[in-house]
Amino acid sequence: MENTLVLIKPDGVQRRLIGTILARFEAKGLQIAALKMIRIPKELAERHYAPHKGKPFYPGLISYICSSPVIGVVLRGRNAIAVTRGMMGATFGSKALPGTIRGDFAISDGLNLVHGSDSPEAAAQEIALYFRPEEIHAQAPADQAWVYDCSGGSPV
Ligand code: IDP
Ligand code: MG
């Protein structure tokens, strides 16, 4: 099983889309392994978005992510990183396909509701920015044998 960091960004919280967005990930079969609401301090935003430092949108991105509380979530599941990114849709709301979170609920290219880690390395780094190890609950959910095919031993 793989863990990934998702943030419901300030626009998602302000637009009361927390439940809608979490419901999609849960219905897919992803497990909520950790969850908290936080107001991201500037220093944390700068660490999280360090790979984007120097890009034209970077200052606006930092002020956006710090502008209101966010929901931080660790989602756990098989191929959780790629599955979550697929469900989020393309970066720009104007380009994201219908059926994705950004495609269905965002039209802005900057305010795009969700963040999701894009690689195992990024997921490990980002999860550590927001959660202590003991805050992450990896106990298999009770319905695991109905969410995955476990007939061969390991879930597929
Ligand atoms: P991602 O969130 O789909 O992984 P990234 O390229 O990692 O996209 O960009 C991080 C965030 O920066 C985006 O989600 C979006 O909020 C913002 N962003 C990216 N590119 C632009 C842009 O060209 N204009 C405004 N904001 C942008
Ligand atoms: Mg990214």
Image (cartoon, grey):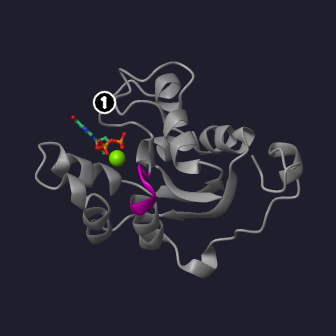
Give the residue type at disc 1: Asp
Which secondary structure lies at badge 1?
Answer: loop
Residue at 57% from the left image edge and 22% from the top image edge: 99
Q: At which x and y percent is residue 111?
A: 35, 37
Residue 67 in the figure: left or right of residue 9: left
Residue at horizontal 30 percent and vertical 62 percent from the top: 45
Residue 33 location, quadrant: bottom right
Image x and y of residue 137, in percent:
69, 70
The stretch drawn in magenta includes residue 54: no
On the image, the x and y values in percent for residue 131 come to 52, 73
Q: Is residue 33 above or below residue 18?
A: below
Between 37 and 98, the residue placed more toward the observer is: 98
Question: Is the shortest distance between ligand 1 and the CB of mark 1 under 8 Å?
Answer: yes
> Start and end of the magenta stretch?
117-121
Write the residue at 57% across / 39% down.
17
Quarter of image, res 87: top right
Residue that label 1 marks: 109
Residue 12 vs 69, above or below: the answer is above
